Amino acid sequence: MPCMSDSSGDAASSPAEPGAVRERLAAERAGTSERIAALSREFDAIVASNALVAVDDEHDPEGSSTAFERAHVAALLAQARDHLTTLDEALERLDSGDYGWCAVCGEPIPAERLEARPTATTCLRCATAHPR
Ligand SMILES: [Zn+2]
């Protein structure tokens, strides 16, 4: 039966439906991968242009703004990689059936919290009680 799975009109009422969650996580993962690739290119470009100019002018203001820019891009890159790890972990939990259950109290995480934060591992109560 090849044409049974493509009914996308009636699933809007359950945001924590695994298929929809997986799609959303996968889409966000793809976007994050792209961001990492773009930031990596940017980082390499900054390093390359810095290597060209920073031969003997250590006190050049351009040099320090390049260093700042490089640190900024590096921070964004680290953030994006962190996020990718979080998304991978959420996808793993989805596969193992742990997704949507609070890691602290074992209660189901409310759908609207997962809607707002698909990578949440705890319910709001536990997140508030045990901030990381
Ligand atoms: Zn909890």
Image (tube, rainbow, N blue to C red):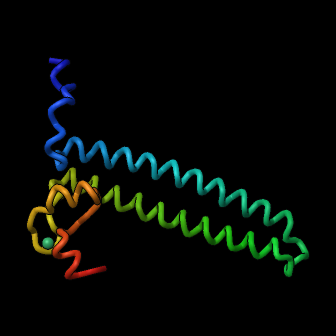
Residue shown at 69% from the left, 58% from the top: 44
Residue shown at 14% from the left, 45% from the top: 14
Q: In this picture, is 131 found above or below 121?
A: below
Q: Is residue 37 left or right of residue 8?
A: right
* Residue 74 rendering spot, x and y as whole percentages: 59, 67
In the image, farthest residue toward the right? 56
Q: Is residue 65 left or right of residue 86?
A: right
Residue shown at 72% from the left, 61% from the top: 46
Q: In this picture, is 85 found above or below 29?
A: below
* Residue 26 rendering spot, x and y as whole percentages: 35, 45
Residue shown at 54% from the left, 63% from the top: 77
Q: In this picture, is 39 found above or below 126?
A: above
State the residue in front, 127 or 121.
127
Image quadrant containing the C terminus: bottom left
Image region (quadrant) for ligand 1? bottom left
* Residue 84 rendering spot, x and y as whole percentages: 41, 58
* Residue 81 rendering spot, x and y as whole percentages: 47, 61
Q: How many marks?
A: 0
* Quarter where residue 127 is shown: bottom left
* Quarter where residue 92 is shown: bottom left
Image quadrant containing the N terminus: top left
